[in-house]
Image (cartoon, coloured by chain):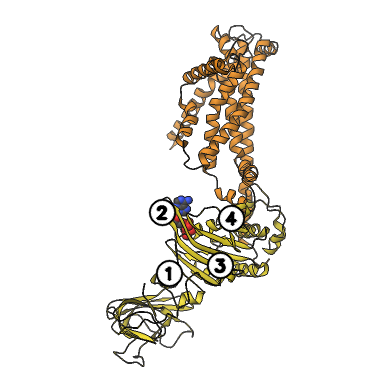
Amino acid sequence: MKSRGLFARLALVLGLVFLYVPILSMMVFSFNNSRLVTVWDAAHSPTLKWYAALLSNGQILGAAWLSIRIALISASGAVVLGTLAGMALARFGAFRGRLLLAGMTAAPIVMPEVITGLSLLLLFVATEQLIGWPKGVGAVTITLAHITFCMAYVTVVVQSRLAGFDESLEEAAMDLGARPLQVFLRITLPLILPAIGSGWLLAFTLSWDDLVITQFVAGPGSSTLPMVIFSKVRFGVTPDVNALATIMVLIVATGIAIATVWMRYQQRRRERDLQLAAAANLSEPLQS
Amino acid sequence: MSAILKMNAPTTTAAADPASAYVRIANLTKKFGDFVALDNVSLDIRRGEIFCLLGGSGSGKTTLLRTLAGFESPTAGTIHIEGADMSAIPPYERPVNMMFQSYALFPHMNVEKSEMLDIVKMGGFGARKPHQLSGGQRQRVALARALVKRPKLLLLDEPLAALDKKLREHTQFELINIQQRLGVTFIVVTHDQEEAMTLGQRLGVMNHGRIAQVGSPCDIYESPATRFVADFIGSVNMFEGRVSEAEPDGVRIECGELACALRVQRAVSCTRGATVWTAIRPEKINISRQPPAQAAGADNAVRGTVREIAYMGDLSIYLVQIESGKVMRVTLPNTTRGAERPIARQESVWLSWHGSSAVVLTE
Ligand SMILES: Nc1ncnc2c1ncn2[C@@H]1O[C@H](COP(=O)(O)OP(=O)(O)OP(=O)(O)O)[C@@H](O)[C@H]1O
Ligand SMILES: [Mg+2]
C-alpha cells in the first residue's frame, strides 16, 4: 500500500518535471543578466533588462500587434463560418453533399500543415491572376488562411454541442410563436454560446501561435510574432526571447486560471440550486 | 341458420357530427422511411373535451401530437382545426400549444411573471431558473407556459409521467379543474390507463399506428371492440371458441378451454360456426364453495382449484386453475374486515358469471 503511494507520488513528480522544467528554466533565464542564455550571471541577476529591451524593440512589438489583430479577426471569422457549418452538419439531416461538407471541414485538422499552407498559397496566387485579388501575400492572406483552418476546429466544437442539444427546446419556442430566426437568436444561440466562446478561444490560440501555414502565405513586412521568434532563434536563442516567451506563458496561464475558477464557481452554484430544489420537492405543500 | 345481428357496441367510426368536430384528423399517415408510425388515422376531437390518447410504447401517440403541432408533416391525410386546413401552417402560426414530455423549459431564462403562474399555483416563482425548481414545480411551470398564449387546443405529452404516484393523482384532478376553468380542449397522451380513465371524457386506444377504438372510458372498458383493447385496458380472461347457437338476444359458444359452454346474453354480430373470443373481466366472476344456482354442467359455471391469492388491500386477486388446466383471474373486493372463513389456497371452488358480463369479440 505504502509503496504504491510512493510510486504514484514519484510518477507525479517526474511528470511535472518533464512538463514544466523546460518552461520554468526559460522563465528563470529571462531574468538572467548574461548575454549567454546558458550561463547564469549570479552577480547581477535577477534583472528586468530583457523585458525593458522588449518594450523598445519595434520589430517585436509590431509583430506582436500584427499577430493579435490577425488572431482576433481570424477567430471571429472562424466562429461565424464554423458555427454555420456546425449547424448545417448537426441539424439539416441527410442533405445532399453532407458527407462532402463533413469531410471538407475536418480536412484541415488531419491534413499536414505544410500541405494546407502550400495549397492555400497556390490558391491565392491563382485567384490573384484570375480576379486580381488578393494583391500579393500579406496580412490579408494570412488572415484568410487562419480562418480556413481555425474554422475546422470551431465546427467540431459547435457540432458536438449541438449533438447534445435538446431539440424540443427549439420546438417549444416555435410552438410558442417564435419564428425560425427568433428561435435561433433567443434559444439556440444563447445555449450554444459557451461552445462558441471556447471555439473562439481555441481559434484565437491556434491563430496566435501558428507558424507553418503562416510562413507559406506571409509576405515581406507581414511577419507575425511566431515568425519573428523563429527567425531570431535560428541565430541562437537570446535572453529577450526568453522574456517574450515568459510573457506569453503568463498571459495564457492567467486566461486558463480565470476560466477554471469561473467554471468551478458555476458548477458549485448549480449543484447548490439543485440541492435546494430537491429539498423543496420533499417538503412541497401540495395545496397552493 | 345464420343471423347477422346489429352490433350495439358504441360506434367507433370517426364520422361523427361535423359540427361538433373541433379537430378533424382524416386518413393521416406518417412514415419515417419505410416505417409506418401513423397508419391511416381518422379521429374527431370535440370542442372543450379532454381526449386521452392511450397506447403501448411506440404506438405512435407522440408522433400524432407532433403532427398536430406541426413539427412533423404528414405523409398523407389532412388535419383541420375549426374547419381550417393545417397543411401549410407552420407550428408558430397554429392555434395549438404543446406541453412537452421533457417539459423543454428554457434553461437560460427565468420563469417570469404571468397570470398563468397563479392558475398553476406557482405565483411566487417568477424569478427562478428551471434548475432551481423541483420536478413538480417544473411540471407546473411547463403547463403555465403552454397556457400563456391561451391556446384553444392544448396537446399534453405524458404530462404527469415524471411525477411520483401521489403527486400525479393530485395533479390529475388539478388538470381537469384548469381545463374546465379555461375552456381549452385538451389532447393528453398517456400510457397509464388509470390516468386516461380519470382524465379523459373520451379515450382513443392506439396500436401500431392505428386507432383501435374510440369511446368513453366505460365504453372501452365494458365493450372493447377488439382483443387488443380488451387486453390492453385492465385485465381480462379470454377464451377462444366456436359459436354453436346464434339468436337475436345472444349466442352460445362451445369452448375447448372451458369445461362448460358460454352463453352470452348480448346481441353479437356473428354467424354460427364462427371462431370468436370471449372476454370476461376478473371482477365480474363470482367465486364460491357451493355450486352456483345454475348447478353443475350448466353454462357459465366451472369448477377449479385456487392456486394463488394476492391480497391487495382494497381487493384480493385469486388465480384459479380450472379443469382444462387454464388459469383464470378473479378479483373480489374486501368489503368486510376479517371475513369469517376466507377462501384459502388449494381449496376447490366454483366460478360463475352472468351471461351479460361477457363480451364476444370477432377480431
Ligand atoms: N424521427 C423519427 N425517425 C424515425 N422513426 C421515428 C421517429 N419518431 C418516431 N419514430 C418511430 O415511430 C414509432 C412511434 O413513435 P412515438 O414516439 O410516436 O411512440 P409513442 O406512442 O409516443 O411511444 P412512447 O409511449 O414510448 O412515448 C416508434 O417506433 C419510433 O421509433
Ligand atoms: Mg411518446
Find residue A131 and report its image quarter: top right
Check chain identity for marks 3 and 1: say if they share one.
yes
Find residue A219 and report its image quarter: top right
Q: Colour of chain B?
A: yellow
Q: Type of residue at label 4?
A: Tyr
Check chain identity for marks 3 and 4: say if they share one.
yes
Disc 1 marks which residue? B232
Disc 4 marks which residue? B103
Q: Between tags 3 and 4, which lies in front? A: 3
Specify whether B126 is left or right of B270: right
Mark 4 chain? B
Tag 2's secondary structure?
Answer: strand
Measured Cα–Cα span from mark 1 to mark 2:
23 Å
Disc 3 marks which residue? B45
Q: Between tags 3 and 1, which lies in front? A: 3
Disc 2 marks which residue? B35
Mark 1 chain? B
Q: Type of residue at label 2?
A: Phe
Q: Type of residue at label 1?
A: Phe
Residue at image point 68% right, 58% down: B148
Measured Cα–Cα span from mark 2 to mark 3:
26 Å
Q: Which chain is orange?
A: A
Q: Nearer the viewer, residue A23 or B34?
A: B34
Q: Earlier in the sequence, mark 2 or mark 3?
A: 2
Q: Earlier in the sequence, mark 3 or mark 1?
A: 3
Q: Nearer the viewer, residue A174 or B194?
A: A174
Q: Position of residue B7 (x, y in %)?
A: 42, 80
Tag 1's secondary structure?
Answer: helix
Specify whether A220 is left or right of B290: right
